[in-house]
Image (cartoon, rainbow, N blue to C red):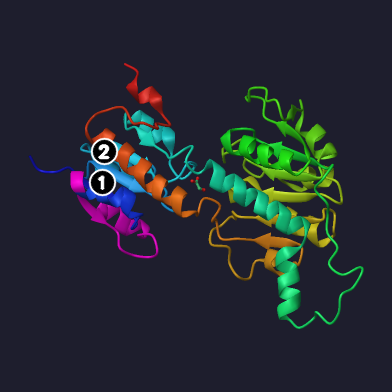
Amino acid sequence: MPKPKVFVTRVIRDKGLDLIKEFCQAEIWPGELPPDRATLLEKVRGVEGILCLLTERIDGEVLDAAGPNLKVVSNHAVGFDNIVIPEATARRIPVGNTPGILTDATADFAFALLLAAARRVTEAERYLRAGKWVTWGPSILLGMDLAGKTLGLVGFGRIGQAVAKRAIGFDMRVVYYDPSAAPAWNATPVERLDDLLHQADFVSIHTPLTEQTRHMVNADFLAKMKPTAVLVNTARGGVLDQAALYEALQAKRIFAAALDVTDPEPLPLDSPLLTLENCLITPHIASASTYSRDMMAYLAAQNLIAGLKGERLPHCVNPEVYER
Ligand code: GLV
């Protein structure tokens, strides 16, 4: 029997690729950059499976370009805002994602950003490299303490909860805003987002990007934060209005921000945010530990292969497709 044809939009880690090559006739996009839209539309033609990254927008046009053979779309990410899920569901195509295995890596990185922004780590390194370190000084590069302070988590899913665990070890109090979350022993829910913003010394974003959360962090949100507060975003760039953040940081209406995600990605080098000392930005690497990236590739391959076999995906974001 011929192996099923699939398109994989980038070279992923061997742990996933080996599995895919064994089971499928795979075309793997070799470029460092994602295929452009026209190439994507051409490459998916007639395939039974697509394994994509968060850099590809998978919408009705792509699904139709693939055509009636398409059985599964497997996203190499836990977030899936790059995929128009109702379009996939309407065509009864299951969509897979990679939850769980990147929780700790992402929470570690959110905490690394929190610490780095609070204690001005990257700014201090720039200071040193610029030859500004001329002596030890009592008031040089002062930052914010964590112990005894309040961390506000916007979104209390797997990653938010893992960040809470880390914060407890730093003697922080944790509050969260997430109407759909179950109670937790180590964190206190707040009823309104405003309550969190008024209390929190650190605000960390852990919501998916949806119509409801797009630009949730806007001028009004930032105005309600404490002037000494630090904002961390490891979720999605679209959750935050970057122009409003620039204004707030420049006017020192909040102390600092640390972002692992931007809109667009990559962030253009002429972004005003990059002119600010109190804004730390990394290139969407929160899940970039060897273990996490190996396991993301593995789970994405498992989802792909299950879909090709007509089996239920181990991690399916639109299980409605299995309802009769
Ligand atoms: C990364 O951002 C992911 O959603 O896995």
Image-based side of 260 in relation to 223, left or right: left
Q: Nearer the viewer, residue 187 or 82?
A: 187
Q: Residue at x 27, y 34 (%)?
A: 307
Q: Nearer the viewer, residue 161 or 95?
A: 161
Which one is in front in this view, the residue at disc 2 or the one at disc 1? 1
Image-based side of 68 in relation to 109, left or right: left
Looking at the image, the residue that sits furthest to the right is 138
Q: Residue at x 68, y 67 (%)?
A: 274
Q: How many tags in the picture?
A: 2
Looking at the image, the residue that sits furthest to the left is 1
32 is within the stretch colored magenta = yes
Q: Where 272 sits versus 105, above or below?
A: below
Mark 2 and mark 1 residues within 8 Å of each other at the beta carbon: yes
Q: Position of residue 301 (x, y in %)?
A: 31, 43
Instruction: Tell me the number on the disc at residue 19.
Output: 1
Name the kind of residue labelled 2 in the image. Ile
Q: Position of residue 16 (x, y in %)?
A: 32, 48
The mark nearer the N terminus, 2 or 1, is 1
Q: Where 324 sits versus 41, above or below?
A: above
Instruction: Tell me the number on the disc at residue 305.
Output: 2
Q: Position of residue 68 (x, y in %)?
A: 22, 36
Name the quadrant containing residue 144: bottom right
Mark 2: few, some, or many residues within 10 Å (few <14, many ≥20)?
many
Mark 2 Cβ and ligand 1 under 8 Å apart: no
The magenta segment is 22-44
Q: Is residue 234 visible?
A: no
Quarter the N terminus occupies = top left
Q: Is residue 156 visible?
A: yes
Name the quadrant containing residue 2: top left
Quarter the C terminus occupies = top left
